[in-house]
Image (tube, rainbow, N blue to C red):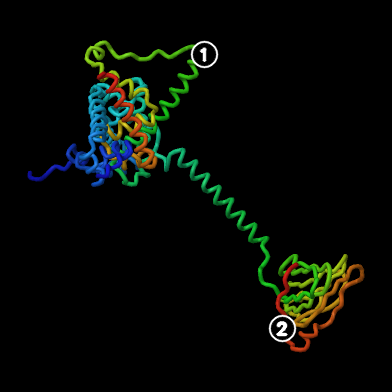
Amino acid sequence: MKREVCPDEAAVSRALTTVSDGKLARHLRACASCRRTAAELAQAIAFARRLPTNVPVVARTEELRVALLASAGVAPVTAGSRTAQRRSAAVLAAIAFVALLLGHRRHERPPARSHASISPAVGTRYAVVSFQPRETVRLWEGELALEVDPLGPGEHFIVEVGDGESWSAGRSSPSSRAGIASCVSRSLAVASRCGLTARRSSFSTPVKPGPHPRSARKGSRPFRRGRRP
Amino acid sequence: MTGKFFSLRPGRADVVAISDEALLAACGTGDLTALDTLFLRFHIDVYRFVGRLLGIDELARDDLVQGTFLEARQAARRFRGTSSVKTWILGIAANLARHHLRSERRLRDKHARYGDGLVLVSPRPDEQIERRELLREIAQALASLPPDLQIAFILCDLEEIPGVEVARAISIPQGTLWRRLHVARKAMRAAVKKATQ
């Protein structure tokens, strides 16, 4: 017959206080060793209960009661303990900090929407450095085919191709229709719902404005957004 | 002339009929009568519990009992009803006693460092006569336990409060309570064995 493994002594101890499961109760009935452990622990508890307890005499109780009521009368009930108040203050400070952080980040976060489709040529190195309302693409090398949607008031689309050289497209006021250029440093092209090609070679002035062949041919937005290098 | 007289103040029978929870809620509003009644209902339990924690002298015991009810009054609004009012109050007493014992221990260590060992309070002569060897061993074993283990043992095994309630009252996980209780019980069992050998 397979011998049952004795449970942990802590489990036997716990069975003295809580309702033990059937398996443990069965084991305790069968195992003399565990039964003895349980009996010893129970005996120790029973002896400890015989320890003399301190119960105050009536006069002392009355003194305590008077002192308690006097103290309670002086100290009004507050909304919470000092610890709770400190905890609430800490929680409020943390919430304020998170809200401030989120607000700050939200303020800094550029809108994800872009007004342009960028198609880079093979070997082009470029990066979108900011988004609307001042969307800026920096081109280091190669060629980009761009298609820019009509821009809203105060919105700009800029391609930086070198020191002080930029492409800029946008509308500066709501009354303007599409096609009014605003130049950052030097006006090179106007782009509004038209194709543009920006090119940067190593040392030459790189920008070559003009409609992209495919864009001009189809008159729509045929280009997929280019991948960043 | 016929008629009835109604007392404007609640009579003793009315106070007795009020539930513990209602009394505690009234305490939270600053009602001193409710605090008084709460004290009369539970002070013996608190006194007995604190008195069982060894290492607390008589003056400190009175302070702890008083402090427990003052703290209960302040914290009454946070009572959620997850345990009985008695257990909740004993939980407050346990926390206060633990703080007291820790600071006492620190003080004792500090004094020991300077060579001024604290004089241990010895039992009164009449108690010495009454107390048997076994109980002395058990008392010593209980006194030598860390405060957390003492609290677990006294609340669960001597005051016979369910472990679930005790764990909630002193804000510890149930597993931690069972572990503490088991360690304390083993120490008690060893004391019994030592005395009976």
- Mark 2 or mark 1: which is in front? 2
What's the residue at 48%, 16% (across, down)? B111
Q: What secondary structure is found at the residue carrying circle 2?
A: loop
Frontmost residue, A165 versus B16: A165
How many callouts does the rendering have?
2
Front residue of A33 and A114: A33
Residue B158 visible, this angle: no
Quarter of the figure with residue A158? bottom right
Residue type at tag 2: Pro
* Disc 1 secondary structure class: loop
Give the residue number, with chain letter if any, for mark 1. Answer: B114
* Chain of residue at mark 1: B
Q: Position of residue B159 (x, y in %)?
A: 26, 33
Residue tagged by mark 2? A222
Residue A46 can be seen in this image:
yes
Pick out the residue farthest to the front: A1
CA separation in Å, label 2 and label 1:
88 Å
Q: Position of residue B89 (x, y in %)?
A: 32, 36
User: Which label was assigned to residue B191?
Assistant: none
In the rendered structure, the answer to whether residue B49 lies left or right of residue A214 reads: left
Q: Nearer the viewer, residue A132 or B189?
A: B189
Q: Residue furthest left?
A: B1
Provide residue A95's location: percent of width, then percent of height: 54, 51
Residue drawn at (80%, 71%) of the image: A124
Amino acid type shown at disc 1: Tyr
Q: Are marks 2 and 1 in contact (CB under 8 Å)?
A: no
